[in-house]
Image (tube, grey):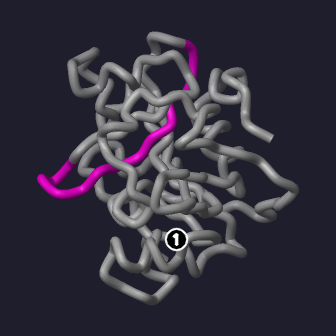
Amino acid sequence: MSLPRSFYERDTVAVARDLLGCLLIHQEKAGTAAGRIVEAEAYLKDDPASHSSRGITKRNAPMFGPPGLAYVYFTYGNHWCLNFVTAPKGHGEAVLIRALEPLEGLDAMARRRGRAAPRDLLSGPGKICQAMGIDGSLNGHPLALPPLTLLRDRWEPGEIAARPRIGISQSVDKPWRLYPVRSREWVSRR
């Protein structure tokens, strides 16, 4: 079942936790790519590590809502990163999707990544976008509509690890990087 906007219009850390186990699906002409979210990081409005901490810009505008949109940005000159906009409109909060367990479209993912090992296909934000064919054309896309959708099934994450975020230089002490302990093999850094 597709998640309603109200799912995202809540506390961002709670949304990050509840995203664990959800299915991310990208449907395109070449086929469907799908994976289960197994690692997510929360970014809040007053967080110096968040793109929104200094206010709205052309780049981060989708992050200010409404909730339930994809916020896709380009970083380090070569990687797209996928976030889900959370909290009420205007807050500028989002959850970075850090890792997926690959489920469908593995051959296409491997071609896009130039690698065949399933463990390495979706174990990082840039890898996710490359393997699943996600780019800036999906920035601001509603997550309830194809081609990029988010669904929940009956999979339960079990025990969840809360660790400091990685790949940032500010607010590194916040334990807002979340992943199911049972899915540790798929996360970006163990």
Visible residue check, residue 27: yes
x and y, in percent, of residue 106 in the image? 53, 76
Work out which residue is located at the far front of the displayed protein and give it. 29
Q: Nearer the viewer, residue 62 or 167?
A: 62
Specify the quadrant of the image occupied by residue 131. Answer: bottom left
Q: Residues within 10 Å of mark 1 (few under 14, many from 20)?
A: many
- Please give the name of the residue rendered at 46% of the width and 27% of the height, measured from the top-left corner: 93
Magenta-colored span: 75-88
The kind of secondary structure element at disc 1 is loop
Q: Is 60 on the left-hand or right-hand side of 141?
A: left
- Residue placed furthest toward the bottom: 117
* Residue underneath mark 1: 187
Q: Quadrant of residue 43?
A: top left
Residue 188 in percent (x, y) is at 44, 70
Q: Residue furthest right?
A: 154
Q: At label 1, which amino acid type do we have?
A: Val
Q: Residue at x 70, y 61 (%)?
A: 160
| Picture layout, residue 37 above or below residue 42 | below
Residue 161 makes an appearance in the image? no
Q: Please name the residue shown 29% across and 32% down the image.
A: 51
Which secondary structure dominates the residues rendered in magenta?
strand
In reply to whether residue 79 is colored magenta, the answer given is: yes
- Spot the residue most to the top: 90
Along the line of sight, the residue nearer the viewer: 51 or 168: 51
Asked if residue 11 is among those painted magenta in the image, a careful observer would answer no
Q: How many marks?
A: 1
Instruction: State the residue at coordinates (40%, 25%).
Output: 63
Question: In this picture, is 176 found above or below 161?
Answer: above
Residue 82 image position (x, y, % from top left): 41, 46
